[in-house]
Image (spheres, helix red, strand yellow):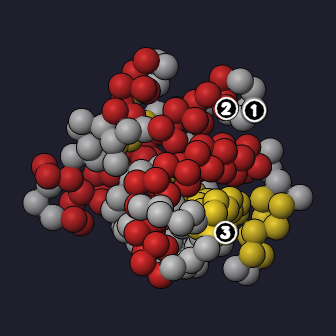
Amino acid sequence: SGRGSNFQAVLDAMRDGRIRATCVGLITDNPKAYAAERARAADIPVTTVDYSRFASREEYEKALLRELVSCNPDLLVLAGYMRIVGREIVKEFNGRMINIHPALLPSFPGLHGQRQALEHGVKVAGCTVHFVDENLDGGPIIVQKCVPVLEGDDEEALAARILEQEHRCLPEAIRLFCEGRLSIVGRRVIIR
């Protein structure tokens, strides 16, 4: 989406030793994403696969898959990627791709999770890290964090509180994956 604050939270956790891993690259579909600047500052290779340069979604997905496979990641982390991931990518990275979503899934999937929560009148909102499968924001849940919805909250205020938890939640899920502590059993993620 552009800011790259979740990407930075992950980089910080790796630098601090909370996550024992190496970032092999950043791939973005947004040539102006600030995450790319963050990656370059950390000497991480950046690749842009600009959706607007392709005649079809199918061509874009094939190019994206080629780039993803060429990085040879153990784990693919989606943070701010605002497109539905294609079936071939999901298949290639089954059980090795996670996403962060600004809502307590399975409630409020898709865009504007914070707005959906406010419109629904919930008392608690939050974020979810989940494995990516064929369903929109429907994969097995790894970690969730909650925040209260306060009287007078607007979408921006709620989003800011949720983002603070995202910065904790995403590194935690990555750490658990890297430590080999996650197992998918049916719809559940078991943490050992």
The local secondary structure at tag 2 comes to helix
Residue 157 visible in image: yes
Q: Work out whether residue 68 or residue 185 is closer to the camera in this orientation and state it.
A: 185
Q: Residue at x 70, y 79 (%)?
A: 187
Sequence-wise first label, 2 or 3 = 2
175 left or right of 121 in image: right
- Are circles 2 and 1 on residues that touch, CB within 8 Å? yes
The local secondary structure at tag 3 comes to strand
Sequence-wise first label, 2 or 1 = 2
The amino acid sitting under disc 1 is Arg
Q: Where in the figure is residue 165, as x and y percent of width and height?
A: 62, 50
Location of residue 121 with respect to 70 vertically, above or below: below
Q: Where in the figure is residue 86, as x and y percent of width and height?
A: 37, 67
Query: Residue 18 shows which numbered tag?
Result: 1
76 left or right of 145 in image: left
Q: Which residue is mark 3?
A: 141
Q: Where in the figure is residue 170, as x and y percent of width and height?
A: 62, 48
